[in-house]
Image (cartoon, grey):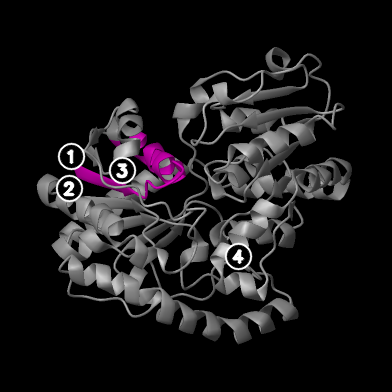
């Protein structure tokens, strides 16, 4: 079978690595695999042993610190067409039996254009069936959440349709796709869905779909091949260990330097900071006995040893922490991270330093700027709360049982990709 993987490649590499986890299983089964990716991530994908179509497309950074508005789509139209056009060109050249995307929030463009079946790996919060609300979550069973959802959902859907979908339809027209999306349902109905989590964390409401599956968190083994032992990193490994992983959300070196200054006020902790893709290790001060900086860290292994994990509310880091039952302190920079951070609070397994307000929901740039303005001392204060709160730690520890019940997520996902391709081909 020929399988084309089309991850979103702007900013961080999280969507690439979750597809690499599936690709490794499918390659071991003898399938032929090609990726599309941005030019800046081409070498990374090739270093994992996979062919990349062409020279790579333009980078579309939906977490651009200077433009978080809906107008980003129009302001960067050429970048979007480079990205989506590359996926169509790759599908036409490779003639795959199935396309696997992540996260497919612009719809199944290559599939619609060429009639190739598609599977999307996407967090449930992006789906119209998500029980909560994007950015706010409010996914609990209580009366307050249910009433708020009922009142707010129509407003959200109208705003989404008015602000977001016209730009997406413009891309479709430019790419020669006749079937245009007029709702969030239209964006997802032509693809099977694999949610890289569990229903307890990302619940959906009633749905008639038979092609929506929870597979559990997808961790790529590539980063985990390195060893991690706190005894080789810190001079006194018995101190409480706080692991900080902020991915590609921090773009200002000064912000990291301010974080390093704040950590100096916590000599009673061991702190490991993993840099995102925007900076080199050489740009920062040397390690000291209780504080270390690494360009890359085997996140699962670090989370196994950590007492608290600090992140942006990214799905990957949150799942790594919860896989080992560790509480999460989140400082979200964008709306999808905000949903994860809000859900951590709803479940009592973490803290959220940048909750969404009503204005934030419609002004993403304002929300991003609020995150930048949160002092690092406040982030570390919440890490201290997590260290001291036995109830939060106990709930996080209990949650790992539910998370691990999914079995082997990458194997389950690979099985479903094969099944979808075979069923579609038979039809």
Q: Is residue 24 magenta?
A: yes
> Which SS class for mark 3?
loop
- Please say if the residues under marks 1 and 2 sit with CB atoms less than 8 Å apart: yes
**Residue 356 locus on image (x, y percent):** 66, 67
Q: Mark 4 or mark 2, which is nearer the start of the sequence?
A: 2
The disc at residue 54 is 1
Residue 54, percent across and down? 18, 39
* For discs 2 and 4, the disc positioned in front in the rendered view: 4
Nearer-N-terminus badge (3/4): 3
Q: Residue at x 59, y 37 (%)?
A: 253
Whole-number angstrom distance, CA of label 2 to CA of label 4: 37 Å
Marks 3 and 2, the one that precedes in the sequence: 3
- Start-end of magenta stretch: 1-26
Q: Which residue is mark 3?
A: 38
Q: Percent x, y for residue 423?
A: 23, 58
Q: Nearer the viewer, mark 3 or mark 2?
A: 3
Question: In front of the other: label 4 or label 1?
Answer: 4
The answer to which of marks 4 and 1 sits earlier in the sequence is 1
Q: Secondary structure at mark 4?
A: helix
Taking the spot 52% from the left edge, 64% from the top edge, the residue there is 125
The residues bearing labels 4 and 1 have C-alpha atoms spaced at a distance of: 37 Å
- Answer few, some or many: residues within 10 Å of disc 1's Cα (few below 14, many 20 plus, some between 14 and 19): some
Kindly identify which residue carries mark 4. 366
Asked whether residue 200 is in view, the answer is no
Q: CA distance from mark 3 to mark 4?
A: 28 Å
The answer to which image quadrant residue 304 occupies is top right
Q: Quadrant of the rendered structure where residue 309 is?
A: top right
């Amino acid at each position: 079978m020929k399988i084309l993987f089309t991850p979103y490649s702007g900013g961080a590499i999280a969507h690439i690595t979750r597809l690499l986890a599936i690709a490794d299983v499918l390659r071991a089964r003898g399938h032929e695999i090609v990726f599309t990716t941005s030019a800046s991530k081409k070498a990374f994908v090739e270093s994992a042993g996979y062919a990349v179509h062409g020279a790579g497309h333009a980078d579309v950074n939906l977490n651009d610190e200077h433009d978080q508005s809906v107008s980003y789509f129009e302001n960067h139209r050429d970048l979007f067409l480079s990205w989506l056009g590359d996926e169509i060109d790759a599908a036409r050249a490779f003639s795959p039996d199935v396309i696997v995307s992540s996260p497919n929030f612009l719809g199944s463009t290559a599939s619609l254009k060429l009639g190739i079946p598609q599977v999307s790996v996407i967090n449930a919060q992006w789906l119209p069936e998500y029980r909560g609300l994007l950015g706010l979550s409010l996914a609990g069973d209580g009366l307050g959440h249910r009433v708020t959802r009922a009142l707010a959902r129509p407003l959200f859907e109208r705003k989404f349709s008015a602000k977001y979908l016209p730009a997406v339809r413009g891309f479709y027209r430019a790419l020669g796709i006749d079937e245009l999306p007029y709702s969030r349902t239209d964006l997802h109905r032509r693809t099977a869905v694999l949610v890289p989590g569990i229903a307890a964390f990302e619940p959906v409401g009633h749905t008639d779909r038979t092609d929506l599956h929870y597979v559990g968190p997808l961790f790529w083994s590539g980063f985990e091949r390195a060893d991690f032992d706190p005894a080789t990193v810190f001079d006194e490994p018995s101190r409480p260990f706080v692991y900080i992983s902020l991915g590609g959300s921090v773009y200002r070196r000064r912000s990291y330097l301010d974080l390093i200054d704040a950590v100096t006020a916590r000599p009673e902790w061991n702190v490991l900071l993993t840099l995102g893709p925007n900076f080199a290790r050489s740009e920062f001060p040397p390690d000291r006995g209780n504080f270390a900086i690494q360009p890359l860290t085997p996140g699962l292994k670090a989370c196994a040893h950590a007492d608290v994990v600090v992140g942006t509310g990214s799905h990957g880091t949150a799942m790594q922490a919860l896989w080992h039952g560790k509480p999460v302190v989140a400082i979200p920079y964008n709306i999808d991270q905000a949903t994860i951070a809000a859900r951590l609070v709803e479940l009592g397994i973490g803290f959220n330093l940048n909750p969404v307000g009503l204005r934030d929901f419609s002004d993403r740039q304002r929300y991003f700027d609020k995150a930048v303005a949160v002092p690092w001392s406040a982030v570390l204060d919440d890490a201290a709360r997590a260290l001291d709160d036995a109830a939060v730690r106990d709930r996080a520890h209990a949650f790992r049982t539910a998370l691990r019940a999914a079995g082997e997520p990458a194997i389950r996902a690979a099985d479903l990709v094969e099944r979808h391709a075979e069923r579609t081909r038979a039809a």
